[in-house]
Structures are given as C-alpha cells and as structure tokens.
Image: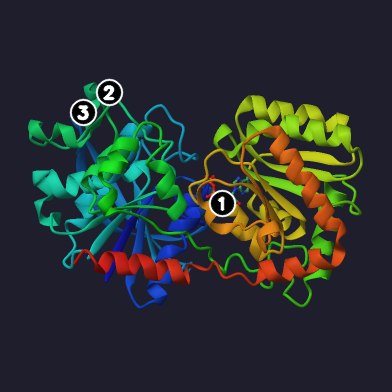
C-alpha cells in the first residue's frame, strides 16, 4: 500500500512531544512490512534543517484566502530514517525556529494542509490512504472528501489519529475565507459549538478516527474538551490503537546517548553507572532512590501537582529520596520548581528546558518515573521507562491504564487513581518500600525490560485498519 502520513511533527526533524515519536516510527515499521509509507511535514528552520541535506522535488503556488503563496517540497537526502521524509517550505510561514505558538498558527497550518494536498493531487499514483495526525492536519479529510478542487482525491480513504484531544485549534467563522472554496451547505462539516474546529472537522469527515490507546478512546466519549457527543455519535468508525515505541531508537544496549549502554545481563551495572552520572551532575545522593519526571510542565500532565508533592515528601522524609525534574511549560510551575531547589539541595534538582540526550540518560539512570497525568492519551514515557528498567509510577488514566499494571496485581508498576498530591506521595512511599526489597526490585527490572511494546504490533494494526477501508 502507498501510505502518506501528514503531521506537524516528526522525529528527529522536529519534536515537541509524542506526536513526533509516532510520526517518526510508525512509517518506518510500515515500510518494514513491505508497504510504501512516507511523511509530509512543514520545513521548519531548525538545527535539523541546517545539519541535513534536502533535495527540492516540487514547487508550486497555492492560495490562502486572497493571498497567493509559493511553496516548495523538499526530500531529506543524507539520512536514512526508514521512510521518505518530505517537508514543505512556505516562505514567511515556516522559516522560523519554533514549531508552534505563533499568532498566525492557523494560517501557517492551513497553508501547510493546502500545499500538501495540492502536491499529492499531482501524484501519478495516488496514495491508498492518507493518514492525518492531530489538529494541524484536521481539515485534510474534509478537503479531500468535500472540496471540489480536490475531487481527484475523493475516493482515497482518510484516517485521522487523535494524539491529544485537548488542543483543538478552534477559530471564528470570520476566518473561513482562509479555507479553499466549498458549498455553503457544507459549513456544518467544519463547525462545532459555533466555531470552526479542525478536530471536529476531522472526526466528522475522516473515514476512520483513531486514538492512541484503547482506554483513551473510552474516555474521550465522556471527556474531551467539548467533543464528547460527537465522538459518541461517530463511535462506529472509531477505534483505539495503542502506540508502540521505536525499539531501535529506544534500545539501552545501542543507545549512544547513554553514559553507559546496558542489556538485560548488565542491567544493574548499567543503570547504576547512569544514575551515578546523574547524581553527580545534579548534586543528588546516589545511595537513595531516584524519582524523576520528564515532560511538558502543564496541568494535563499533573505537573502543577509536583511542587507541593516535592515539598510534602521531602519535608516529611528528608534525605530519603531524590527527585529530578526535566521539562518546560507553564511559567508558574517552572518558577515553583526552581524555588524548591535551595530548600532541598542535595536531594532535588530541576532542569527546565528540552534536552533529548538528558531524557535518555534519565530513563536509563532513574529508579522510578512519575507520571501523575490528568490526561494521557497514550503516554510514551512509561513505555521508554519500562524498556530502560525504570518503574513507572502513574495515575490510572488513558494509555497509562492500558500499559501499567500495579505490583499488587502481579504487575510491575505503581498506580494510583486520583490526581492529588496525597495519591502521588502515597505512591512514592510504596515505591520506596519496593526499592528496599532488593531482590524483588531487581527481578522487576528484568521483567520490565522484556515487555514488548515495539511498533511491530501497532504498525500491523494500522495496516489492517487501512485494508478494511478498501
Ligand atoms: P506528550 O506528547 O503529551 O507531551 P508523550 O508521553 O506522548 O507526551 O511524549 C512525550 C515525549 O516527549 C517523550 O519522548 C518524552 O521523552 C519527550 N519529552 C517531553 N519533554 C521533554 C523534555 N523537556 N526534554 C526531553 N524530552 C522530552
């Protein structure tokens, strides 16, 4: 099958979160299954662009409202990602360093979607399926199925994956002129709650809708920032497929980012070496368990609960544990995390920012990974933690419920039900008890490392889904 993925992020070219990891891995595993899977993304002016060679393969003109714009399609040349990576350069819109958070994000991503389809429509052999990811690509299923100028694409199945339903990118109808022309009676296909809503548009118009875990699919029918009824209505074409991980990138025995690589046999020595390096770097105590958090410092991830949890645990049990935070996000959370550093020096540290290499070392060197998420569509961090022998300490929600089983239920992780400081603190207490039971703790590390969450399974599930649309 010829599969085209369209995404705003794709690892390693541009990553903000899990979307990039999925877009950078799923196509590779689909190609390994002998399909022809490629990715189209924006051509951001990032370090990745500067450090790699690209070949221009297409140039075109398109319209965004009343403005004509030029775009150019580049193909990544010198790096073998396991799939063809195409990126669309639109001067004035994507020649910037950051991926999101500009005032004109709507214009940027609508222009991106139009350019992507304007190029696809010129293909001699059209794709067998177009797979769109998250709100920045939400109009594509509508353009393909309802807009006259894309009539040639009408019979191509479109699949839309919700990686995170909280961000919907809604805007006023006064900006409808940005979209290509269509019959006015089709307005209902792009509208939700009086606004143009790209996620609602995708759910209404895609042939299939998927979420990144089965449990999140159940949850969104009751809680997804206002779209619950729509998801209930469209439930027959919706399915949850659990993400995998790229076990070539995330492999502790080959991971060049680690301070020491390790396999199942050398797990204790390997983890200790990485832990010691972290403790040395961040002034922590290597003889005590190391708890970490990696991720966006936003409410959705429960990051706002971290400062009070750190205060509670560190004051009640001084010197008994280390906590290391890696993340960036809401200013008030960042500030609160910084403020605690002098108070609990020697056992607590935070690194505010994004650092891919450090994240790998932390997955390898930590004893426990905290994920107190309020919302977690799939969660990749816990899967990376398992692969690196680190115990996930999670709130039971979304994909965390699908992937982490509590040690009390013959599992390997530590789970709680509520997103509260006391639930997290209680879990930290249970984790410390588990850590002190050396034999069980070591055996559990081996058990976790052997759980297979690779993309092989999920890549097949997506292929089956595409085939069902033929
Ligand atoms: P989300 O996409 O909602 O942020 P996921 O769990 O799906 O959450 O994916 C998060 C990905 O981003 C993981 O690969 C994680 O390691 C990475 N990540 C998040 N924050 C940081 C950071 N500050 N530094 C390095 N990697 C990060």
Q: How is the structure coloured here?
A: rainbow
Q: Which residue is mark 1?
A: 400
Instruction: Specify few, some or many for label 3: CA neighbours under 10 Å numbering under 14, 14-19, or 20 or more.
Output: some
Q: Nearer the viewer, mark 2 or mark 1?
A: 1
Of the two numbered discs 1 and 3 on the same chain, state the one appearing first in sequence: 3
Please give left or right for residue 465 compared with residue 332 in the image: left
Q: Which residue is mark 3?
A: 176
Please give left or right for residue 87 compared with residue 267 in the image: left
Instruction: Specify few, some or many for label 1: CA neighbours under 10 Å numbering under 14, 14-19, or 20 or more.
Output: many
Instruction: Specify few, some or many for label 2: CA neighbours under 10 Å numbering under 14, 14-19, or 20 or more.
Output: few
Calculate the distance from the C-alpha at mark 3 to the C-alpha at mark 2.
7 Å
Q: Considering the numbered disc 2 on the image, is that residue within a helix, a strand or a loop?
A: loop
Label 2 CB sits under 8 Å from any ligand 1 atom: no
Q: Can residue 11 be seen?
A: yes
- Expressed as whole percent of the image width and height from the top left, the position of residue 292 reads 73, 47
Q: Which mark is residue 172?
A: 2
- Expressed as whole percent of the image width and height from the top left, the position of residue 421 reads 70, 33
Rendered position, 7 above or below 269: above
- Expressed as whole percent of the image width and height from the top left, the position of residue 276 reads 86, 57
Within the image, what quadrant is residue 135 found in? top left
Label 1 CB sits under 8 Å from any ligand 1 atom: no
Q: Which mark is residue 283?
A: none
Please give left or right for residue 146 compared with residue 409 in the image: left
Q: Considering the numbered disc 1 on the image, is that residue within a helix, a strand or a loop?
A: helix
- Measuring 38% from the left and 71% from the top, which residue is drawn there? 460
């Amino acid at each position: 099958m010829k599969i085209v993925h369209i995404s705003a992020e794709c690892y390693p070219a541009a990553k903000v979160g899990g979307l990039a990891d999925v877009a950078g891995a799923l196509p590779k595993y689909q190609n390994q299954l002998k399909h022809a899977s490629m990715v189209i993304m924006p051509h951001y002016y990032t370090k990745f662009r500067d450090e790699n060679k690209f070949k221009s393969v297409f140039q075109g003109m398109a319209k965004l409202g009343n403005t004509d714009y030029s775009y150019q399609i580049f193909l990544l040349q010198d790096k073998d990602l396991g799939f063809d990576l195409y990126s669309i350069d639109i001067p004035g819109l994507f020649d910037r360093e950051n991926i999101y958070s500009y005032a004109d994000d709507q214009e940027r991503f609508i222009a991106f979607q139009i350019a992507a389809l304007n190029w696809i429509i010129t293909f001699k052999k059209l794709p067998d399926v177009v797979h769109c990811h998250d709100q920045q690509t939400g109009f594509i299923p509508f353009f393909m199925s309802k807009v006259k100028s894309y009539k040639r694409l009408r019979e191509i199945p479109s699949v839309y994956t919700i990686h995170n339903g909280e961000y919907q990118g809604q805007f006023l109808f006064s900006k409808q002129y940005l979209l290509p022309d269509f019959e006015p009676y089709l307005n209902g296909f792009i509208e939700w709650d009086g606004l143009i809503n790209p996620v609602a548009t995708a759910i209404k118009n895609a042939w299939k809708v998927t979420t990144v875990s089965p449990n999140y699919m159940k949850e969104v029918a009751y809680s997804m920032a206002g779209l619950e009824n729509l998801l209930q209505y469209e439930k027959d074409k919706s399915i949850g497929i659990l993400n995998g991980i790229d076990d070539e990138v995330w492999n502790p025995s080959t991971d060049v980012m680690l301070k020491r690589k390790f396999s199942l046999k050398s797990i204790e020595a390997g983890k200790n070496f990485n832990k010691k390096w972290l403790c040395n770097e961040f002034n922590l105590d290597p003889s005590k368990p190391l708890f970490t958090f990696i991720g966006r410092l936003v409410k959705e991830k429960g990051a706002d609960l971290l400062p009070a949890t750190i205060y509670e645990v560190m004051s009640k049990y001084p010197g008994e544990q280390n906590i290391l935070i890696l993340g960036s996000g809401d200013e008030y959370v960042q500030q609160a995390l910084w403020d605690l550093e002098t108070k609990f020096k020697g056992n607590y540290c935070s690194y505010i920012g994004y650092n891919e290499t450090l994240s790998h070392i932390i997955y390898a060197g930590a004893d426990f990974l905290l994920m107190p998420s309020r919302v977690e569509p799939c969660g990749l961090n816990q899967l990376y933690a398992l692969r690196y022998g680190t115990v996930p300490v999670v709130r039971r929600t979304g994909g965390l419920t699908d992937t982490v089983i509590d040690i009390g239920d013959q599992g390997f992780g530590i789970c709680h039900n509520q997103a509260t400081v006391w639930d997290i603190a209680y879990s930290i207490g249970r984790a410390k008890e588990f850590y002190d039971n050396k034999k069980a703790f070591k055996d559990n590390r081996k058990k976790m490392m052997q759980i297979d969450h690779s993309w092989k399974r999920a890549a097949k599930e997506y292929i089956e889904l595409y085939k069902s649309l033929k």
